[in-house]
Image (cartoon, rainbow, N blue to C red):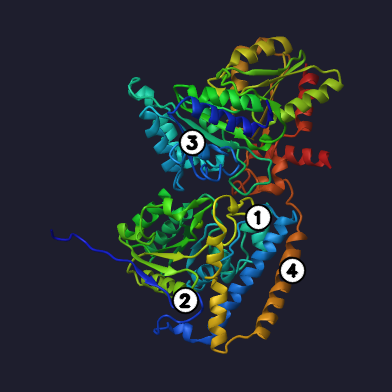
Amino acid sequence: MAAITLIEGVTQALAYEMKRDPSVVVLGEDVGVNGGVFRATQGLSEKFGEWRVFDTPLDETTIAGVTVGLAAQGMKPVCEAQFEGFIYPMMEHICCHAARMRNRTRGRITCPAVFRAPWGGGIHAPEHHSEANEHLFTNVPGLRVVLPSSPARAYGLLLAAIRDPDPVIFFEPKRIYRQYKEEVPDDGEALPLDVCFVLRDGTDITLVTWGAQVKESLEAADALAKDGISAEVIDLATLTPLDFGTIAESIAKTGRCVIVHEAPKTAGFGAEIAARIAEECLYDLLAPVVRVSGWDVHTPLYRLENKQLPSTARVVAAAKQTLAAG
Amino acid sequence: MPIAAKFEIEYLQYLDADGKLVREDLPEFARDTKTMVELYKLMASTRVFDTKSIALQRTGKLGTYASCLGHEATHVGIGSAMKPEDVFAPSYREYGAQLYRGVRPRDVYMYWGGDERGNDYQNEPAKHDFAWSVPIGTQCLHAAGSALAFKIRNEKRVAVCTIGDGGSSKSDFYGAINVAGARDLPLVAAIVNNGWAISVPRRIQSGAKTLAQKGIAAGLACIQVDGNDIIAVRKAMSDAIERARRGEGGSVVECVTYRLGDHTTADDARRYRGKEEVEDAWKKDPLKRLRNWLEAQKAWDQKQEDAWQAQCSEWMDNEVNAYLETHAQPVTAMFDYTFAELPADLARQRDEAIALDKGAH
Ligand SMILES: [Mg+2]
């Protein structure tokens, strides 16, 4: 068993499921011979042919709408928006059709589709290639929003997403696509959706995060440990539907919480976590909840992008502020 | 059975791949050697600029860059057919057209170098043009909206947009030509068909025999031209633009050219297209054919070529240096253009960002 990167986890899951289930098809721009601009679909076209690894014309509306049609006919489409910044034309089909198909037909037609997209900043990419826009989808009923942060979770969660009977937005943090390798057995074992992952146990403070910010949050936990502070790190992995129980359990233990995310602060998904904590965990809190996030500005071009992305230092400072508060 | 309607698409070419005239009815501008030399010079300088850009990227001084290699005749032809008062809505590699309209090479470097100031064109007429549009095809609708504004205000101006062969698949493109046809808007959509949309070849982008004919469905005037022949591009674009200016409606002009380079510096075209195809395309090089034609008329020679190359090189070196001397904007720049006036809530975040930034230094 070879060690693989996060993006190879994506490729491995697609290949496994396409072999196991002939109704799985991949579609998007440059997913065929080119293997995707990040190589997520590398080798699939050779293995499964041009009809199951389908290069679409250059139109995101086409990709998303065709995906809905495929899914409604019993196929299992996994479509790709080449970058998260190009997903907006897909939103009509995702929001008005994919997400509500089951509900509006009282279950007669369903939409078991996966909408994949590389997500987030930090790779010095051009304009519209570095957005964090998961919060635009977490408010849509009937959608699962998944953001893996390790090779194993990319593999296991993508398998689960494809097998799930409802539509899933599957954002892949491109900054950590090739951050490190780990051994991921190609055994077709899916990981559970709707479950958060506790990546590090701690007793003094809870760091809640997802996507590429898992990296900064774990680094912050290391730094805090040097000062004798024990931080628990939770990777949401599936943002909606949310496994709030895992967060509540952690806060019952620590009494403190810092939420870390890349997207702008206002109405980012951190706001939802903070609201749930206020509703359900207020009496467990020893200090106000703090969010470390992007500012309420457009993702800057890359000369300034590191001023927008939360740094490890900001997470550590926020944790210490929380600890000092009570 | 009676025919409800019948259509055909004309193909326009003056200079063949070797630079020989294939028709005698040269347009007025092409009979003027001075004009043609000026066009050649801009095409040549665009190529020098492009070569420098790629070198900058390869040495880590520029981010991802979209090359315009091979598109020089199409781009300069489009730019030179426009009047200053017209509005240009480009995608992201039409530098030849933009340099003609006053965009500076350093602006291009700034944009691909990760700095929003690259979008802040300083010189007229580019100053009133749209900035680059990376979301494919979206600029077509902005051009259609501009054309509607001209129509409402009764201005004799034309909006010109460019899209790729891939871009012509986008709903935005279809929407733009549709509204232009429905309301006779002064819109000219130039399809720069360079054969490839990253890795997807023209033949699976659309089942249509020509991309120009998409305009027929929208009720526009349509023509396909040899996009490596600047005389054909400029003539077809001028005709389309002046027709629109006269209030006779919009056009689709398909310029058939070839992307001699990778899609961007982040792409490797060897993964999906053969060497022979690219070698064949080089035989149709737009620069070479114009130079052959000019030389045959004794309007250009090796000495002038060498002098111009040297001059371009110096020009681009100055532009590169101007770019490299810039520093990243202060952290406040992220906030200051979000709204006309900074809202109080955002001002608090701005203060926090300034404090953090000071702490980091
Ligand atoms: Mg193209």
Chain under callout 3:
A
Front position among marks 4 and 3: 3
Q: CA distance from mark 2 to mark 3?
A: 43 Å
- Do callouts 3 and 1 point to residues on the same chain? no
- Secondary structure under tag 2 reads loop
Front position among marks 2 and 3: 3
Q: CA distance from mark 3 to mark 1?
A: 37 Å
Residue hosting label 1: B112
The three-letter code of the residue at mark 3 reads Phe
- Do callouts 2 and 4 point to residues on the same chain? yes
Closest to the observer, A120 or A319: A120
The three-letter code of the residue at mark 1 reads Trp
Residues packed near mark 4 inside 10 Å, few (<14), some (14 to 19) or many (20 plus): some
Residue A168 relative to residue A156: left or right? left
On the image, the x and y values in percent for residue B121 come to 61, 62
On the image, the x and y values in percent for residue A275 come to 59, 20
Residues packed near mark 1 inside 10 Å, few (<14), some (14 to 19) or many (20 plus): many
Residue hosting label 4: B317
Q: Which mark is residue B16?
A: 2
User: Is A96 located above or below residue B72 in the figure?
Assistant: above
Who comes first in sequence, dot 1 or dot 2?
2
Q: How many marks?
A: 4
The three-letter code of the residue at mark 2 reads Asp
Q: CA distance from mark 1 to mark 2?
A: 34 Å
Front position among marks 1 and 2: 2
Residue B205 seen by the camera: no
Residue hosting label 3: A48
- Do callouts 4 and 1 point to residues on the same chain? yes
